[in-house]
Amino acid sequence: MVTRHALIAVLGWTMLTGAAEEKPALPGWMAGCWEAQSGERWTEECWTSSRGGVMLGSSRSGKGDSVDLWEAMQVIADKSGSGMTFWASPNGTKRTPFVWRADAEPGVTFHNAENDYPQRVRYWREGDTLMAEIAMADGSKPMRWQYKRK
């Protein structure tokens, strides 16, 4: 039989450990170079390891020997340590911020409801595969990539 004091202690521990999970660590599990290929179409994405609260990323996509799109990206921890921001600059355009928000999904999800498309950027791992998805804030119009380590 569980006593009232034991139950309160367990609930208190759960609340404390849950609060600790709200402070995110940069997604170091994204580090490395990754590639997705479908026929002649390909996308490559490379991420540095986390250092000093910053991860740097680059991406390029194309068909055969031609590059259709390239992108400079960063994931930067907030000075307070309570969050992080994903910055995207496709083809060298002005950097667009997407702010991390805790949710029930695996991995990390970044949001910017004021951006035309995408409004949500999400990364997660499934074993040795790096998964990436962009979509509208409500999850509609998704585009998904499955990357293998290059």
Image (cartoon, rainbow, N blue to C red):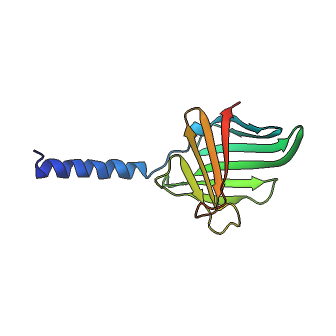
Residue 116 appears at what percent x and percent y?
71, 67
Residue lying furthest bottom in this view?
Answer: 114
Name the image quarter holding residue 110: bottom right
Toward the right, the furthest residue is 66
| The C terminus lies in quadrant | top right
What residue is at 71 percent from the left and 54 percent from the top? Answer: 88
The residue positioned 62% from the left and 62% from the top of the image is 140
User: x and y percent of residue 96 in the render?
Assistant: 70, 60
Q: Which residue shows up at 85% across the image and 42% down it?
A: 63
Quadrant of the drawing holding the N terminus: top left
Q: Could you say where residue 8 lies in the image, as x and y percent from the top left? A: 18, 52
Compared to residue 92, the image places residue 66 above or below, namely: above
In this rendering, position of residue 79 left or right of residue 33: left
Left or right: 36 in relation to 10: right
Q: Looking at the image, is 127 positioned above or below residue 92?
A: above
Indicate left or right for 100 with 33 as reference: left
Name the spot of residue 49 as percent of width and height, x first. 62, 36
| In the image: residue 94, left or right of residue 105 | right
